[in-house]
Amino acid sequence: AQKVTQAQTEISVVEKEDVTLDCVYETRDTTYYLFWYKQPPSGELVFLIRRNSFDEQNEISGRYSWNFQKSTSSFNFTITASQVVDSAVYFCALSEAQAGGTSYGKLTFGQGTILTVHP
Amino acid sequence: DSGVTQTPKHLITATGQRVTLRCSPRSGDLSVYWYQQSLDQGLQFLIQYYNGEERAKGNILERFSAQQFPDLHSELNLSSLELGDSALYFCASSVGTGTASYEQYFGPGTRLTVT
């Protein structure tokens, strides 16, 4: 069974600090997808990024960057120069792409990391 | 705005009652997923439909059922409600099925409170 672990329950930083959110996953499949979602205080879930298991290139989008390391089954998320608006709960999620199987894209989420950025 | 709509936003009801949550997917999306978010269980997948057919089931209780209609909107029915059913229920939609490559876009959720 697939599993996602976000060991950091809560992180508190001061504005402009860099912060890294850790995500470790378990899966038996060779083909899978990893995601990060953001849940701001308003409650909605906002899609941030998708990564497939064959693409280990790091990705940068503005102040956000993601580091995918298959060797350690990790998909970490870094926010550079954090801002108060980054305060939210961040979820890492895993989906297996099993052709002919029963896992048709359902997401398995980690427990989430609460990030608080203080001014 | 993800383009996924859910109604109602809030629902307060008593134990033993039955409620229906409604979801309209993004235009063009054929897959609808339901998730439950609670403090003790976190975010959990309940069920998925694709173009009207059930495609995957997660930790969905027998008291819960869902369907997807020809216009692709979906409803999640919760019956014999218990206090523990209080949670935020999300609907998500994606373009395809049979593959996990399509990202899921989530609606704003329905917050259910059972008293």
Image: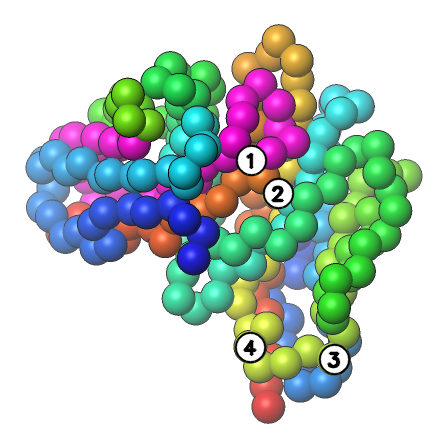
Q: Which mark is residue A85?
A: 4
Looking at the rendered image, the quarter that the N terminus of chain B falls into is bottom left
Res B31 → quadrant: top left
Labelled pair 1, 3 in contact (Cβ < 8 Å):
no
User: Are the residues under marks 2 and 3 on the same chain?
Assistant: yes
Q: Which mark is residue A93?
A: 2
Q: Secondary structure at mark 3?
A: loop
Q: Which mark is residue A81?
A: 3
User: Are the residues under marks 3 and 4 on the same chain?
Assistant: yes
Q: Residue at x 70, y 35 (%)?
A: A33
Q: Secondary structure at mark 2?
A: strand
- Structural crowding at the residue carrying mark 3, measured as other residues with C-alpha within 10 Å and reported as few (<14), some (14–19) or many (≥20): few
- Structural crowding at the residue carrying mark 2, measured as other residues with C-alpha within 10 Å and reported as few (<14), some (14–19) or many (≥20): many
Question: Sequence order check: which comes first, mark 1 or mark 4?
Answer: 4
Q: Residue at x 79, y 23 (%)?
A: A30
Q: Mark 3 belongs to which amino acid?
A: Ala
Q: Mark 4 belongs to which amino acid?
A: Val
Rounded to the nearest angstrom, the CA distance separating label 2 from label 1 is 6 Å
Question: Sequence order check: which comes first, mark 2 or mark 3?
Answer: 3
Q: Closest to the observer: A117 or B84?
A: A117
Would you say A57 lies left or right of A90 here? right
Chain ID, mark 2:
A
